[in-house]
Image (cartoon, rainbow, N blue to C red):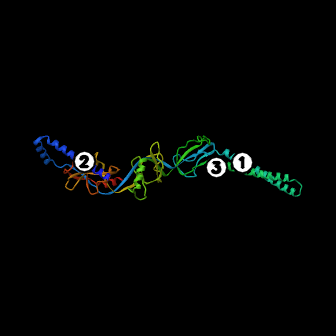
Amino acid sequence: MSGDWMKAARGAMLWMGIAAAAVVAAGLSGCGGDGGKEQAAGAAQSAPPPEVVAARIERADVPLNLEFMGQTAGSREVEVRARVGGILLRRAYEEGQRVRQGQLMFEIDPAPFDAALDQARGQLGQAEARLNRAKRDMDRMRKLHEGNVVSQKDRDDAESEFDAASAEVVSAQAKVKEARINLGYTRVEAPISGMTSKETRSEGSLLTTTADGSLLTTISKVDPIYVNFSMPGQEVLRLRKLREEGKLSFNGHGDYVARIVLPDGSIYGHDGHINFTDTQVDPQTGVVRVRAEFPNPDGLVLPGQFARIKLLGATFRQVLAVPQGAVLRTQQANLVWVVDEAGEVQPRPVTMGEAVGNDYLIEQGLSGGERVIVEGVIKVRPGITVRAREAAAPVAESAAGAAQ
């Protein structure tokens, strides 16, 4: 009951304001005496009705188009580093070009690692020889122990010597394996396929395994390509709420369709989709990080580019939309001017919803089919007759065209 009473009170205040304006206008016109009244009457009869532009408001689907600024990045960014130290002999790829996974990129001097492998093999041979001797001694001691020629301690010592020699062989085998691995690391191969960056060390440089001395170059996987951007936290909350309330629906894939606007203003030829939305708002900036993924088979989009990203596919189903310039804001209510078939103008209080582009969605006050003044609002007042010219295109169609 209180809500109905407040709506009635606001409506009464609105019409009182309009009536007061009319009374003031009438009083001002009466200040001039009878002669002034006659002149005003003659002017009213001779003045043509003002010309305005009106649009017929019909229910239609209104697309919601979002646009943000983002930056491209490779779907994988890998640092190519030296895993062993030594002198860099040569670079085997062309900077800035594509490489395949497993392709040779750099070669480190292998001579010291060849020598280390030979040394490890020699140590393995010595350990195997000791193992063979220990095995013969152990077998001999077992036979002698069976004939009560040697003590139990002598047999146990021989078996312990055999176990130690076996362990030395395992350790020597591991050193050979390590030396072989290090020798293989002298050939630095591409860990992934992608676009290479500039080399950070030239031939003849001494490489180390530290963080500063091991970096050789970077590889970016550009197919697919990522676009990282941010959405205001309040915007994310608003969109989720509209979606949960069923006011916003999606076509096709059931989610946003992402498009890249390249720096020259052209639209990138492949559509993408959102593959990551952060679960928290950055407390310092108040934004939510979002990432979209796009196919990039030709490598047209490079990592590090700034580009605008559009999110399409969201639609307000069967809603009424009016241009923002058609809405008159007052302290009592928001108004639009409705023109009937005879050209008479009357104000209509409306309840506005979301702002979509240059339009407002109307939740209450219009039912569809009304003609609303969209240009020339300042020329009209309640009850006058106007000459209404139809708008070039219906509001809903204009909004739909903006989505393309």
Asked if the residue at tag 1 contacts the one at tag 2, i.e. Cβ–Cβ closer than 8 Å, the answer is: no
Comparing 206 with 25, the one in front is 25
Q: Look at the numbered disc 3 and give the secondary structure of its residue.
A: helix
Which mark is drawn over residue 120?
Answer: 1
- Kindly identify which residue carries mark 3: 184
| Image position, residue 291 (x, y; %) | 47, 50
| Image position, residue 28 (x, y; %) | 17, 41
Mark 1 to mark 3 CA distance (whole Å): 15 Å
Which mark is drawn over residue 377?
Answer: 2
Q: Is residue 232 visible?
A: no
The correct choice, above or below, for 36 with respect to 346 in the image is: above
- When asked about the image quadrant of residue 56, the answer is bottom left
Q: Earlier in the sequence, mark 1 or mark 3?
A: 1
Query: What residue is at 43 percent from the left and 56 percent from the top?
Result: 255
Residue 103 falls left or right of residue 296: right
Query: What residue is at 27 percent from the left and 49 percent from the top?
Result: 9
